[in-house]
Amino acid sequence: MKRRFLLAVLGAVLAIGLSGCVFEPVDNLYALPVLPQEYRDLQNTIDATISELGAEYATISYGSNTATIQLLDLDSDGEQETAAVFLRVTSAEEKPMRVCLFRQDSSQTYRQYVMLSGEGTSFNSVAYEDLTGDGSRELIVSWQLSAGVHILSAYNFTKSGANQLMNTTYNEGYTTVDLDQDGSQELLVFQKDTTGEGYNLSEYYDYQEGGLVMVSSAPLSDGLKNVVRAESGLLSDGLLGVYVTLETENGWLTDIFTLERSGLKNVTRDEESGVSLATSWTNTEATTVDINNDGVMEIPRPQLLTPPEAENVSSQYLIYWQQVDSRGKSATSCITYHSFTDGWYLTLPNGWDINNITVARDDSLSGRGERAVVFYYWPDREEEPRRFLTVYRLTGSNRISRSKQPGRTVLFSDSSTIYCGVLDTGVWNSGLDEDGLSERFKPITAAWSNR
């Protein structure tokens, strides 16, 4: 009896407590979360600065730091003590761009302590890296002057203000890398020759005597149209390099830079042709990536397959992925088939000979949400090719039932698509079984970045 009474009292208390929520006005139920006082104070301070300057928020075009207000832990103590705000003064004729830094004081109030001014109409990119080796991060700003013309600046901060470490004009891109492996980041700045009388260059900046100094440079490949991507990674002999992917007049290529005692070196560029011939490619959307997850970057080299039919067949390729060492020598690490149309790739087992394999698409049921890629074994061109593997991309409301048709094995699925395969092991010894097929099948993901 006592337990039933206590439960009844508890229920009454909960009912009374909940009634305040149930009968709240509708506007209160849909109110936005209230920000902590320190962030409301920060916004008020920013609003006052914008009003005083006659400014507006400015856009940041590229990179991973594109917000107009960024909370930062510059001294790496685990606390976001700094806020960076990016503005454009609408009335300023010279240096209208502003980077305003606000820092928390002892009362946890954000107060402005640095304002940086720059040329241009917007910010191309912003990054934060330790360039000096003191454990704190510096600010790297790319001010956009016009299409393809930027000023790259770097600043470090003290309690009283900011020091400019570098200020240079560039027209392609840049990346940060600890190429000398001393614990601090350096800058590689990419310049396109616009005169026709010089070289496209990669310039290497290192911190020396209170500033970032260009200590060496090395040529990029000739025929440069755009620097598409730059990232650091290991070479096949364990040295660190910077892989710079270019769009050229004849397709794509990757220049690889290392740091030697004599300075920066492009280890893949052929002196006679002026181009990294061994790391150039066309006819694929694939780009430089660590495709087999062994810590070493690979470069795609597509090889055309003989089509099973003479007419009305789209060109199909296998991709031979090349690893490069610090002398510029390359070797194949793995071979894949990539279906960019359907968003997947397959790493092939050892022993698949390009002369014995052909591939064709089958989109005859695409109107019903089913597309397929068919692999054929074709060692004798005088005979008909024999189908041994089909990979299906299934979409639509009945994709689950279609994936359960006889012989189909689900390889991957997400909220809108199911990929499945049908393998005939009796055609030839392909080195595949259903488990191996699932392990070698991957969805295509892209991670492009540009600065």
Image (cartoon, rainbow, N blue to C red):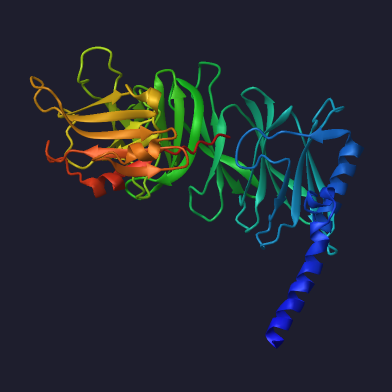
From where the camera sits, is residue 449 visible?
yes
- Residue 39 % position (x, y): 81, 53
Q: Is residue 392 left or right of residue 76?
A: left
Q: Quadrant of the N terminus?
A: bottom right
Classify residue 369 as left or right of residue 430.
right
Residue projecting furthest to the front: 1
Q: In the displayed structure, would residue 367 be above or below residue 444?
A: above
The answer to whether residue 379 is above or below residue 2 is above
x 76%, y 70%: residue: 14
Q: Would residue 99 be found to the left or right of residue 272 on screen?
A: right
Query: Residue, x 32% and y 48% (percent of image)?
Result: 237
Residue 374 at x, y percent in the picture: 25, 29
Is 77 or 352 nearer to us in this picture? 352
Quadrant in which residue 410 is drawn: top left
Can you tell which quarter of the image residue 245 is in?
Answer: top left
| The C terminus, quarter of image | top right
Q: Nearer the viewer, residue 7 or 321?
A: 7
> In which quadrant of the rendered view does residue 145 lie?
top right
Locate residue 435, reporting x and y percent. Answer: 25, 49
Position in image of residue 424 (x %, y %): 17, 38
- Which residue: 36% across, 48% down? 293
Nearer to me, 26 or 444: 26
